[in-house]
Image (cartoon, rainbow, N blue to C red):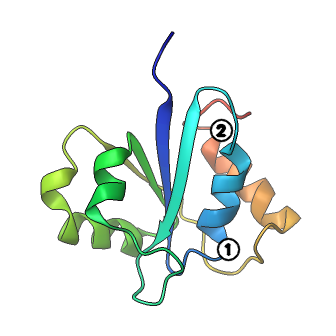
Amino acid sequence: MSQALKLLFLCSRNQRRSVTAQSLFRGAPGYEVKSAGTDPGATIRVKQEHIEWANMIFAMEHRHLQYVQAHFKESLAGRRLICLEIPDKYGGMSLELLDVLKKRLRLYLKMP
């Protein structure tokens, strides 16, 4: 049996985009998922442990990737970093956000 692919979704505050992305894959066979934010006030702020845990890291915006690259550079070896380019203009779990996430993530992952 193959190892589950560990996905980390990042946004600013870990309240809408990353949490919605996490919900798409929660409980899906072949995936383990976590989400975090880069801002100091994030519900769950990204830590080195998150980076070391993940196989693939999906950032909603380039600034989230830049944050990870600046703060966790030594932990990024062997991890795939992808920017989904999804701005913070959608409500959490909104149909619009779900549609955009599915469209972008389909390029990299088999959707559950």
Q: Is residue 85 left or right of residue 22?
A: left
Residue at position x 30%, y 42% in the image: 79
Estimate the x, y position of residue 42 in percent, counting from the top left.
Answer: 49, 82
In the rendered structure, the answer to whether residue 58 lies left or right of residue 21 reads: left
Residue found farthest to the bottom: 41
Mark 1 Cα within 10 Å, few/some/many (few <14, many 20+)?
some
- Give the image quarter of residue 38: bottom left
Q: Nearer the viewer, residue 54 or 62?
A: 54
Decide if residue 10 is on the left or right side of residue 71: right
User: Foreground residue, 86 or 54?
Assistant: 54
Q: Amino acid type of disc 1?
A: Arg
Amino acid type, label 2: Arg
> In the picture, residue 21 is in which quadrant?
bottom right
Residue 23 in the image, given as x and y percentages of width and height: 71, 54
Label 1 close to label 2 by CB (< 8 Å): no
Q: Which residue is identified by label 2?
A: 106
